[in-house]
Image (cartoon, rainbow, N blue to C red):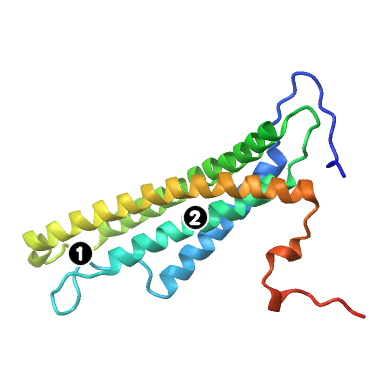
Amino acid sequence: MAPPVTPIDAGRSYLEWGASTGGIAVSCALAIVLLQFGAGVGLSLGEPLLEDGSASWNVIVAGLWTVVVAAASGSAGGYIAGRMRARHGDAAASEVEFRDGTHGLVVWAGSTLIVAVLMALLAALAAVGAAASPAAPDVMTDSILVRLTQSNAIIMAFAIGAGAALGAGAAWFAAIMGGEHRDNGLSVHTLVPGPFRRKSVR
């Protein structure tokens, strides 16, 4: 059975902001929740040195968690946008796939900008708090600590960049999958693991 189609006026954009905005909202909310969860269980940047003076591995864990958060939030938002947008009947299968994937990229772009603004605001508040705090002891100027701090900044910058790229790809492919599920009328219960599916009442 052919998927339902929606007529479209000549000159009208194929980009549906309703579906995209919903995906952006889901992606941002999931990213914030996962980042809060990570901070709560210790998956945050932390101090560059442990109590015994050795280098901390927290930055590696925090970087990996950042990548996971980007991929998960991008996938969730992209799937929502791809599945919720209406398919128009004037395109071949390859064009439908491109339009679905583009909605995923729009979700990724919008959520990335919003999260970046929030992180910049938090960084600004932290800088204000640090400026108002008492002067740090001389040990904070130690060359080893400075090098570790610089290394941690490089690692986190790489993790954020890699997470952004992975999130874009995840949003693209998740949106395409959402579009395929929309066209095939696939039940959402198919995505739920068997033990958690709602059992039919006989």
Residue 162 in the figure: left or right of residue 53: right
State the image quarter where residue 141 is shown: bottom left
Looking at the image, which residue is at 85% across and 29% down?
7
Q: Which mark is residue 142?
A: none
Q: Amino acid at mark 2?
A: Ala
Q: Compare residues 198 and 156 and report the one nearer the observer.
A: 198
The spot of residue 45 in percent (x, y) is 31, 64
Position of 20 with respect to 155 (left or right) is: right
Mark 1 crowd level (few <14, some 14–19, many ≥20, 10 Å Cα): few
Residue 178, x across and y down, in percent: 68, 49
Horizontal and vertical percent position of residue 2: 85, 41
Q: How many marks?
A: 2
Secondary structure state at the residue bearing disc 2: helix
- 27, above or below 55, in the image: above
Q: Residue at x 66, y 40 (%)?
A: 100
Residue at x 54% of width, y 47% of height: 111
Q: Where is residue 133 shown, x and y percent of the image? A: 24, 62
Q: Determine whether 181 is above or below 96 in the image.
A: below
Tell me which label, 1 or 2, sits earlier in the chain: 2
Q: Is residue 107 above or below residue 193?
A: above
| Amino acid type, residue under disc 1 in the picture | Pro
Q: Quadrant of the N terminus?
A: top right
User: The C terminus appears in which quarter of the rendering?
Assistant: bottom right
Q: Which residue is mark 2?
A: 71
Dot 2 alpha-carbon crowd within 10 angstroms: few under 14, some 14 to 19, many 20 or more: many
Q: Which residue is mark 1?
A: 134
